[in-house]
Image: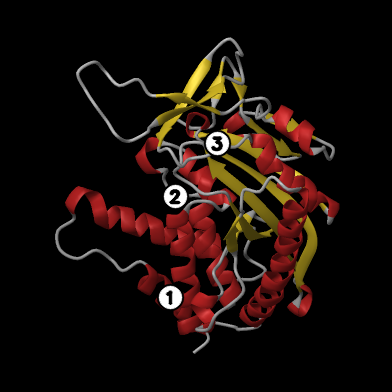
Amino acid sequence: MAHEIETVNGQSAFASLRQPAWHGLGTVFENEVTTKEMLDLAHLSDWNVRLEDVAIPDGFESDKGYSFVTRTNPFDNTKNDVLGVVGERYVPMQNEDLFDFGDLMLDGGGRWETAGSIKGGRQVFGSLALERETVLDPNGVGDKVNTYLLINTSHDGSVAIQASITPVRVVCANTLNLALSAVTGKKAVKQSFKIRHTATASGKVAQAREALGLANAYMDEFDIMAKNMIETEISKAKFDEIVALAYPAPKGEDKKGSHKKHDNKIDLIQSIYVGDYNNTIAGTAWGTLNALTERLDWYRSARGGSNESILASASGFDPMINAEKNRLLKLVREVAMA
């Protein structure tokens, strides 16, 4: 099956701390690393991202200034790659600039966990584990959630420079990047925000402090919500009702095996709910939410035959999956906690 982690001659632009490399690709490292070391391990260093003029063919005219975004190939520095075509207002940035932000975050307490590039180098990401840990412990369950900061951007103008606070349930690596305003019905602290591209040291420091403050404020609200959900008991009948509302059975003829696919999806969610990772929290609203979101992160079929979408989902930067998780969170709370 295809993947979109950038790979050339057996080398892959992906690195991960003490975790199995994605589909056997990339570098696994055992000890904490500096930002420079992380960039090197993930083959993100010295890309020299730059603009090159787009040549207009003879006989054609254009009053719009377009440029190619190019880079030096990280696996063979004798080659150059085109990453995209952009307008005249686009300002290229280096991977080092994006990860400088992480450097400042490390000063606030944290460590690099993953970094890599996908889509032929057009998108770049890194994740930082922060020091904050949540322990949900009714009846000695001890369910742990760690806090991560994901930073990502694109080199083709498709994605802004952004950071997202992402809680991750430790036992199953389930990402719970949720917009809490979706369930509170009021303005909540931000779960994600854009990083301004600034060249000044003071500007970078200010943004790093803002990110740490937002991470702590978000996790304060997340902790209250999660504690409330794990203390809310639900029956098996209520769980089945929530799953049926989340994924209604198809009507009419079984076109293209839709009924079978639906049955398989429901069976999978049921098995996750009582499986090894969730059996201690089954029978709660928290367990219901995690069964539904775990399927999205780790078990669904990759769109378009590519596992890159699963990596994006499990890392927290697939907007469609993030929206689906927020829909499921709202549904679980409305039904289980009414």
Label 1 sits on a secondary structure element that is helix
| Disc 2 packing (10 Å; few <14; some 14–19; many ≥20) | some
The one of 270 and 85 positioned closer to us in this rendering? 85
Does 58 sit left or right of 119 as displayed?
left
Which quadrant of the structure image shows residue 302?
top left
Residue 306 x/y as whole percent: 42, 36
Amino acid on which disc 3 is placed? Pro
Q: Nearer the viewer, mark 3 or mark 1?
A: 3
Earlier along the polypeptide chain: callout 3 or callout 1?
3
Label ID, residue 300: 2
Quickly name the residue at label 3. Answer: 92
Can you tell which of label 3 and label 2 is closer to the viewer?
Answer: 3
Q: Residue 234's x, y, as percent?
A: 54, 82
Q: Where 222 falls versus 292 (above or below)?
A: below
Residue 138, image x, y percentages:
74, 79
Mark nearer the N terminus (3 vs 2): 3
Q: Amino acid at mark 2?
A: Arg
Q: Is residue 35 above or below residue 272?
A: above
Quarter of image, res 16: top right
Q: Is 135 left, or right, of 53 in this rendering?
A: right
Report which residue position mark 1 lands on.
242
Disc 2 element: loop
Residue type highlighted by circle 1: Ile
